[in-house]
Every structure is written in structure tokens, then in C-alpha cells.
């Protein structure tokens, strides 16, 4: 049950929870939820709000650019991001309430997280210019048309949030900003190894911006192809250390080529002009992506059965040819030797 406390005009309070009414001017900061004007590539994503009141979904970070010790909310998990959403809630002298049910989901006295728990049926919160969702964390508020009245709500405990909202004119609409936790698009990457290794496939989950080489090396996967010649030297083998000059970390993209970054002119010269489905893992990142993707990679593509013809031999005169036993899931161009 909710207990009433009239110490703040027009605001019904409960310890850690309350309706923001009357003189309270309310700006929402949504933990894990994002709103407002977004970058174009973010706005077109299929967004999946987490809609959670779990405080462990958030982390409070110090802002180095603020000498007053202001805190900022960020997503705690790699698979979610905090997006900022800005809405306008109408108010008037006859209807001053914001119509929001708030919950203090975390607090240590000096800092806290106040999030939307719900909307009052028929209240002004339901008339906001965009929907407010459960779990949206309050970050800022201001009177409509009066940006100078803006107050920060981010990282504050419940009482401080109520105090700042109450400083706004309740007869004027309020612009509220929240942070919303949104599930980030991801790629399920299946790594396949040459038949000679007799090794089971490995599966990675990667997010936009992840580098293929670093992700695979951190999972214990060997990328350096023993049959690859260094591009920069023309002869011999060896790892350039991720500088994109040796051609030894080339992978074949059997599925999901469009989900990867575009190749540079140097990479095109080294591999993709000869093998359109090959990429240098050290220079390839995931994205941009707008939805979940599936990617299939073949490491050490020269080691796969069927790559070399019957008459090709290594430097010791040993046959290089193997019978290729499986097919690439998408069309594969005719093989052309990539060595310079």
C-alpha cells in the first residue's frame, strides 16, 4: 500500500516509491532505455527494451568532465546499451500531475537510481509524446520552452529527484529525459576448422565493432595459416601482429558477409580482389548491424580440402591437394591463387 506524505505539495510519497504529482516537474532517465533524437543507424534498429527494475542491470560512473562529482548511468552488461529518450508530458493548472509511478531501485544515500514503475491510468504520463516504459531511469527534466529551468536527475536518490521535480512549474508541460536499457543487436559467429584438424566448430557471440582476429585469439583459436605467404615480403610466412600486411589471418566468410565492415583498398588488393569471400581477420569488424545476424567463418582457408589442384606442391615437393568435403553455404567464386 502507498502511504501519503504532504510535505511536498501535490506529491504522494512512499519510501523508495512514489507518484509524481502537483508541483513536481518530472524528467525521466531510463536505465537501459533510450529515447529522444538518436543517430540514424540506432533509430532504425529493431529495439528490444529490457523493461527491468533490477538495479544490477545498471552501473553508475563518475563523469570526469564534471567537477561537482556528477554521476552517469550506463548499462552493466555488454549485451545491452543505455539509450536516451526524451518526451514531453503535458500539464496545466487543472491537471498538474505528471501521472508517473516512480521506484527508487538503488540508493546509498548520496546516489541512487529512480526509474519508472508505471503510469497512472488516465494521467498525463499516458499522454506523453512517446511511450514511457517500465525501467526507464530518470536523467533530466525541464519546463517546456524554458531550457534554463532544466534540472539533472541522473544518479540521484529518490528524495533529491522529487525535490528537483517539485521546483518546476506544475502548470507548464515538462520535457523529460530517461535512459532505457535496450538489447544490442548481436551476431552468432560459427568458426569452422580445416578437416585435417578434426576439430569441432566453435561458436562466438559478438557485438557491433568487435574485431574478428582479437575475438578468435581471445577464445584460443589459431588463425595463422601455415600455407600462407607474407603479402608484404612476397616470400616466406610469418605473423605481422595484426598490422594487415601478411595475409596469414585470412578467413573465408561462408555466410554473413554483409554483416561485416567493408574492406579497405589494401585488403581488396591483398585478398578480396582474388577471393571475394575472404577477409583479413585483423582488419575486419562486425557491423554496422541493425538486427541479429548469423556468420560462418572458415579459418585457414588454404588448408581446406579441395583448395589446391592435384598438381600443386609445397616447397618440399609434397602434394597440397585435399578433397573438399563440404560446400560453402553461399556461392563461392572460382579459386585463384592469392600469393603475389
Image (tube, rainbow, N blue to C red):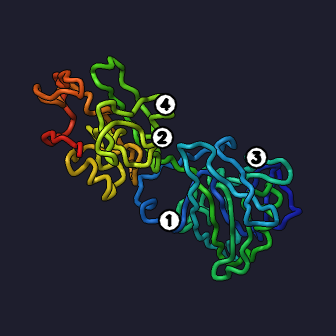
Residue 56 is drawn in which quadrant?
top right
The residue labelled by disc 3 is 106
Q: Earlier in the sequence, mark 3 or mark 4?
A: 3
Residue 91 is drawn in which quadrant?
bottom right
- Of residue 37 and residue 97, the one placed in the foreground of this image is 37
Q: Earlier in the sequence, mark 2 or mark 3?
A: 3
The residue labelled by disc 4 is 219
Frontmost of labels 2 and 3 is 2
Relative height, residue 259 to residue 332 (above, below): below
Q: Earlier in the sequence, mark 4 or mark 1?
A: 1
Q: Residue at x 64, y 52 (%)?
A: 74
Q: In the rendering, at what x and y percent does residue 1 appear? A: 77, 44
Mark 2 touches mark 1? (CB < 8 Å): no
| Residue farthest right in this picture | 7
Residue 265 is drawn in which quadrant?
bottom left
Measured Cα–Cα span from mark 3 to mark 4: 35 Å
Q: In the rendering, at what x and y percent does residue 13 appear? A: 80, 55
Frontmost of labels 1 and 3 is 1
User: From where the camera sits, is residue 249 visible?
Assistant: yes
User: From where the camera sits, is residue 286 visible?
Assistant: no
Residue 214 tag number: 2
Measured Cα–Cα span from mark 1 to mark 3: 27 Å
Q: In the rendering, at what x and y percent does residue 315 appear? A: 24, 28
Element marked by disc 4: loop
Amino acid at each position: 500500500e502507498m502511504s501519503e506524505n504532504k510535505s511536498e505539495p501535490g506529491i504522494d510519497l512512499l519510501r523508495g516509491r512514489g507518484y509524481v504529482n502537483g508541483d513536481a516537474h518530472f524528467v525521466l532517465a531510463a536505465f537501459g532505455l533510450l529515447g529522444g533524437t538518436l543517430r540514424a543507424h540506432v533509430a532504425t534498429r529493431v529495439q528490444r527494451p529490457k523493461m527491468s527494475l533490477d538495479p544490477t542491470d545498471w552501473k553508475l560512473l563518475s563523469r570526469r568532465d564534471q567537477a561537482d562529482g556528477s554521476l552517469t548511468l550506463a548499462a552493466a552488461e555488454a549485451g545491452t546499451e543505455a539509450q536516451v529518450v526524451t518526451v514531453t508530458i503535458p500539464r496545466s493548472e487543472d491537471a498538474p500531475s505528471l501521472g508517473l509511478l516512480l521506484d527508487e531501485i538503488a540508493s546509498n544515500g548520496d546516489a541512487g537510481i529512480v526509474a519508472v514503475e508505471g503510469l497512472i491510468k488516465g494521467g498525463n504520463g499516458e499522454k506523453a509524446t512517446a511511450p514511457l516504459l517500465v525501467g526507464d531511469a530518470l536523467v533530466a527534466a525541464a519546463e517546456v520552452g524554458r531550457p534554463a529551468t532544466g534540472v539533472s536527475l541522473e544518479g540521484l536518490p529518490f528524495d533529491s529527484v522529487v525535490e528537483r521535480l517539485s521546483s518546476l512549474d506544475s502548470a507548464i508541460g515538462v520535457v523529460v529525459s530517461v535512459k532505457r536499457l535496450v538489447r544490442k543487436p548481436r551476431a552468432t559467429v560459427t568458426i569452422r576448422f580445416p578437416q585435417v584438424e578434426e576439430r569441432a566448430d566453435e561458436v562466438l557471440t559478438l557485438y557491433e565493432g568487435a574485431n574478428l582476429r582479437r575475438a578468435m585469439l581471445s577464445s584460443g583459436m589459431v588463425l595463422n595459416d601455415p600455407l600462407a605467404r607474407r603479402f608484404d615480403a612476397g616470400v616466406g610466412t610469418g605473423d605481422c601482429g595484426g598490422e594487415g600486411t601478411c595475409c596469414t589471418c585470412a578467413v573465408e566468410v561462408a555466410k554473413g558477409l554483409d554483416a561485416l565492415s567493408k574492406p579497405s583498398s589494401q585488403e581488396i588488393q591483398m585478398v578480396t580482389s582474388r577471393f571475394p569471400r575472404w577477409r583479413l581477420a585483423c582488419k575486419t569488424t562486425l557491423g554496422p548491424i541493425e538486427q541479429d545476424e548469423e556468420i560462418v567463418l572458415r579459418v585457414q582457408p588454404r588448408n581446406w580440402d579441395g583448395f589446391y589442384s592435384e598438381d600443386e606442391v609445397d616447397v618440399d615437393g609434397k602434394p597440397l591437394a585435399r578433397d573438399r568435403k563440404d560446400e560453402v553455404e553461399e556461392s563461392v567464386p572460382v579459386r585463384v591463387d592469392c600469393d603475389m
